[in-house]
Image (spheres, rainbow, N blue to C red):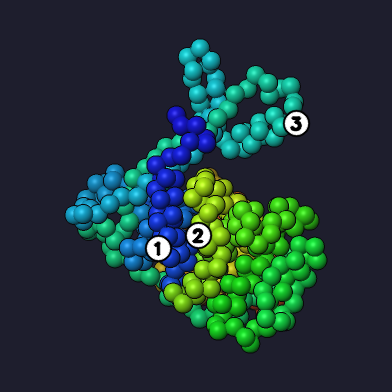
Amino acid sequence: MKNSVAKSKARQDLVNRYLDSLKQDKIPWRCGWLNEMPYNYSSKKKYRGVNAMLLNFISMMNGWLDPRWMTWNDVIKHGWAVKKGSKCAHVEYWYPMRLVDKESKKWVKVSWEEYNTWKANRSKNQSETENLVYTLGCKSFDVFNGECIVGIDPYIEKASAKIEATPFVDKLIENLGVTYKEEGSRAFYSPSKDMVVIPSRERFESQYEYDAKRLHELCHSTGHASRKNRDLSGEFGSESYAKEELRVEIAASLIGIDIDLPSTDANLDNHVAYIQSWIKVLENDPEELFNAISAAQVIDEYVLEQGEYNHMRIQQDLDNLAVHEDGVYEVQHGKGTEKVAVFDSPSGQAYAFLCIKGRLQAYTIPEGCDLEHHRFGKDDRIDLDEYFMDGGMKEQIYDMIDEAGMQEEQADDEMEL
């Protein structure tokens, strides 16, 4: 079992790669193409935090576009082979544990909810936590990229769409409540005024430069006392300033991937000034890099939530649904089976609509799932009332369901989830 503060091999690999690339003027948290987040081939789950940053960086350095990663067991199970000379990457899986027997030193895995509750109660010095002992365990896995595998189906890259407008960033500004101005020739965030200022959009070289700069400064604003309350007191060039720039720049790059902002090599030159102040911090204490990645993940999730990205993405999808080529499937639901109408969307997310006791329900379909054996749960469910307020849109959905061979006889006002 590893201590939670121990540097695993995956972490050290990432530190070495980042340090080396920084010294060579290579910036690892930007890439010149639309980059899908790396995910595990078997579980279809996207890697997060350190694992995601490491695998993204390795892919960028090798020119790989395939986001699929798999263990050696996955390769063997499918009868594939690893290309000669290929090297694996090291990822880690962290999990909470509770001590159940001090004499035998027996530990059992527990849920993150239980661990976080214990941690919160301990900070409040509650007596019931005194005899409880928890820790974090870690397992490391070697994984190979899909482009290193012989026999696997070629990865088909998702078509990249030109970003003409970014309502997500505008919604983020509105919901954060930060003062926002476009004027002058400087870009900065003022904590004392809680104000973001950037040059007017006409002065930017590209749509990417404009949106990336807005995201960068808005990420700074998440540190305001009224939001995430980070230390923003550092002067330019100080270690405190460098730490903030590092976490914000990583966060902005993660958000850019999340909302599909494509970048080019030319965009990277705009970040060089920031990089120079980070090298000192990284060389003095590489653990600062992991602290920054952890903090960046928090900023990333907070910004996506505040900008209502998931809501916007689903709304855009539902505005442009098309009946899936196979139309209707029979799936597991409750104790029996139900027929569902399946629809595709421009983002690649598929949706299922079904009628239970004459009432319409909608679900997202996880990528790569086997519909015939998939049980839809509350995590997949969509509250249609949040998206289909327009009567014409509801009518369109009914028409699409009819086209798929399913009849819905209930009135619009009887729809519920």
The picture places residue 371, in percent across and down from the top left corner, at 44, 56
Residue 373 drawn at (x, y percent): 43, 51
Contact, mark 3 vs mark 2 (Cβ under 8 Å): no
Q: Tag 3: Cα neighbours inside 10 Å, few (<14), some, or many (≥20)? A: few
Q: Nearer the viewer, mark 3 or mark 1?
A: 1
Q: Amino acid at mark 3?
A: Lys
Outermost residue toward the top? 103
Residue 281 visible, this angle: yes
Q: Earlier in the sequence, mark 3 or mark 2?
A: 3
* 1 vs 2, front mark: 1
Residue under label 2: 365
Q: Secondary structure at mark 2?
A: strand
User: Three-letter amino acid code at disc 2?
Assistant: Ile
Residue visible at 62% across and 86% down in the picture: 203
Give amino acid for label 1: Gln
Q: Which mark is residue 24?
A: 1
**Mark 3 = which residue?**
124
Q: Residue furthest left?
A: 84
Going from N to C along the chain, the mark reached first, 1 or 2, is 1
The reply, left or right, for residue 292 in relation to residue 331 is right
Q: Earlier in the sequence, mark 3 or mark 1?
A: 1
User: How far, Cα to Cα, is label 3 from label 2?
Assistant: 41 Å
